[in-house]
Image (cartoon, rainbow, N blue to C red):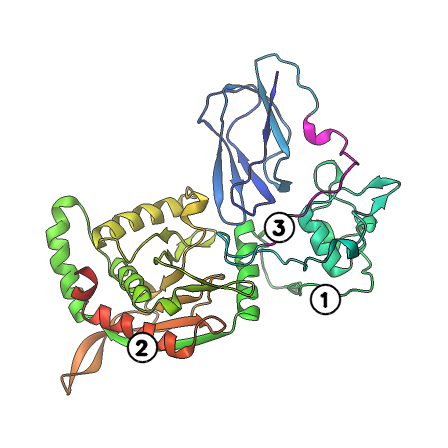
Amino acid sequence: MATELKMPALSPTMEEGTLAKWLVKEGDEVSSGDILAEIETDKATMEFEAVDEGTVLKILVDEGTDNVAVGTVIAMLGEEGEEVSAPSNDKPEAKSAPEAAPSPDKGYGRDSAPEPETKEVPAETKAPAAPTKYGERVKASPLARRLAEAQGIDLTTITGSGPGGRIVRADLGEGAGGAKAAPKQAAAAPTPQAASVDPGDIPHSVEKLSNMRKTIARRLTESKQQVPHIYLTVDIQLDKLLKLRSEMNAGLEARGIKLSVNDMLIKALGVALMEVPECNVSFGDGELIKYERADISVAVSIPNGLITPIVAGANDKALSKISTEMGDLAGRAKEGKLQPHEYQGGTASLSNMGMFGIKQFEAVINPPQGMIMAIGAGEKRPYVIDDSLQIATVMSATGSFDHRAIDGADGARLMQAFKRLVENPLGMVA
């Protein structure tokens, strides 16, 4: 009997994705572990592996297809010549019970950017299960139902573009026949959308946004709108750290390890967060989550945007281990081969733009984390050392703090601890 290959959930909150590329064709023999396709999620482009062996009997979803819901049958696998029956997603949807919406994310789970949720109401006051169209229950994803309810949109006026006419999030701006859906008397205003751009007669090209770029835009907008940022900047002398790095690299050369300044700053931030645990927190739904280790998310630029692989337990790891891990994580990040647990979560972030010659900047907090450290370039500057003006290598570091969770004085203490550890680096390796 043929096996259905379904769109996998490649992250905890993934509801749909783009089938970016098929790496097999109909008639190909595959074995367990073979890479079948590349799937673009809201986080990264990831590989989809075969679990069983057999022949690719039929490909049901073309490459380049957007908004493919998790669980959609995308191909059939079986024995060569086997007859293919209709996939399960083409079968009529059961009418007996409405889809259950997923439980709300309190804002401090593994995924750092939960979708908008409506407040839970007592069972006796809830609206009827789901609107119907021509006597049948409207097919819609749980997310589409929640957003439609929040925005006062009548789902019976929407034509779905998902499998079997299923309404997905992308359809909520379009009604039957392509017209805008007429909102009901809305209890909540819809989320503001970016204005369309008219390039006029300027020579230009149009590039479709990747799922990752859409997610970056949405999350950064949410962060700046919903998180009250407070910024604290310190100047830090680097000469002792640079000297220690040189000495350690000489000792590590035989092992093929070369520490970067960024490796040492990751360690310094991890240790500083343990010294000032009031900053190693997340602000949740009426709760403050306090973490007992420092998992540092490190910003890495990749072709399609930005991803933040995590150095777990950076406060306790040796510098050589941090260096080895970061080399591996950054390399696989640029190849799109990170697993979800390697870039989702983290208790604080570090973003270093010193290699571009940027002197100082203010980074946007990555919710639900409570802070992010922005690192500028080290440069020769006049600096007071032992009551005399000298020339030293100095960098500026700016901490962005969620003022709902972290008081300014605690943020200042973290910056003070970070500065002390970088200026006296033996304190973080002892």
* Quarter location, residue 59: top right
Q: How many numbered marks have been drawn onto this rendered protein structure?
A: 3
* Disc 2 residue type (three-letter): Val
Name the residue nearer the viewer: 113 or 293: 293
> What residue does disc 2 label?
234
Q: Is residue 82 left or right of residue 227?
A: right
Q: CA distance from mark 1 to mark 2?
A: 41 Å
Quarter in which the N terminus is drawn: top right
Sequence-earlier tag: 1 or 3: 3
Residue 189 tag number: 1
Q: Secondary structure at mark 2?
A: strand
Q: Residue at x 30, y 60 (%)?
A: 266
Q: Residue at x 57, y 14 (%)?
A: 79
Query: In the displayed image of the protein, which residue is found farthest to the top?
Result: 81
> What residue does disc 3 label?
103
Q: Which secondary structure dominates the residues rendered in magenta?
A: loop
Q: Residue at x 45, y 51 (%)?
A: 344
The range drawn in magenta is 87-104
Q: Is residue 426 visible?
A: yes
Query: x, y (%) of residue 417?
Result: 28, 72
